[in-house]
Image (cartoon, rainbow, N blue to C red):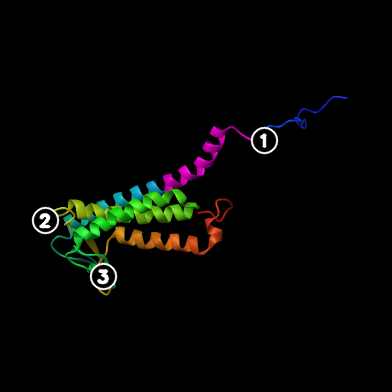
Amino acid sequence: MSEDPAIHLDPTPDSTPPLAAIHEESDVPTRRRLDIIFGVAAFVVIVDQCTKWWALDSLATDPVALIWTLRLNLVYNTGASFSMARGFGPFIGLLAFIVVGFLIWHGRAVTSRLAAFGLGMVLGGAIGNLLDRLLRGDSGFLQGGVVDFIDFQWWPVFNLADAAVVVGAILVGVVYAFGSLSATGGSTNG
């Protein structure tokens, strides 16, 4: 009687893979999520900065009316969100550095692709506005004004980085509010 090699079982299987194999297998999903975070963040920063350069060049003289109350209107924000805390630019900039560091550190613990995407949006938006504070001012360290240009005229003027932060934070909040979305397996993963 011959044994079928396909169903032959080794009586002493080594069920413990080598340490290197465990490390590589567990890092692949984390690395993929970090790639998503940093890829989305880079995309947001590039699009944000390109639209701000366009706004600086095209909206310097007059706003552009689009539809209903929406217009493109160049504004410099030296304060916090919604133009609050004017004059606190350096403090807000330092706080942004801390937030960016926290987001990068927290990115290792993200458990789903959708949360990684949202975190990447928040990170990219924070970096985009931080770059404005660093590079768009002559008054000193972190004294630059954030370039805002999307104006509904009934809502504070904002930019794409601001929109990315809000949408990304909502995504991350939804993922963590509904625990089933944060599972690492299954089709509910972003």
x, y percent for residue 154 = 27, 75
Q: Around disc 1, counting alpha carbons within 10 Å, would you say few (fewer than 14), some (14 to 19), or many (20 or more)?
A: few
Question: Alpha carbon of mark 3 to alpha carbon of mark 2: how far?
Answer: 24 Å
Look at the numbered discs 2 and 1 and tell me whether their residues touch, using CB distance below 8 Å. Answer: no
User: In the image, is residue 76 part of the stretch drawn in magenta?
Assistant: no
| Residue placed under numbered mark 2 in the picture | 139
User: Regarding mark 3 in the picture, which secondary structure is present there?
Assistant: loop
Task: Please tell me which residue is depicted at 35% across the width and 50% down the height of the picture.
Answer: 41
Region of the chain picked out in magenta, as a range: 16-36
Q: Position of residue 188 (x, y in %)?
A: 55, 56
- Look at discs 3 and 2 and give the one toward the viewer: 2
Left or right: where 121 falls relative to 127: right
- The earlier-in-sequence mark between 3 and 2 is 2
The reply to whether the C-beta atoms of the residues labelled 3 and 2 are less than 8 Å apart is no
The residue indicated by pointer 1 is: 15
Q: Is residue 182 above or below residue 72?
A: above
Q: Is residue 30 magenta?
A: yes
What is the quadrant of the N terminus in the image? top right
Residue annotated with mark 3: 156
Q: Position of residue 106 (x, y in %)?
A: 41, 52
Q: Along the polypeptide, which appears first: circle 1 or circle 3?
A: 1
Q: Nearer the viewer, mark 2 or mark 1?
A: 1
Which amino acid does the dot numbered 2 rest on?
Ser
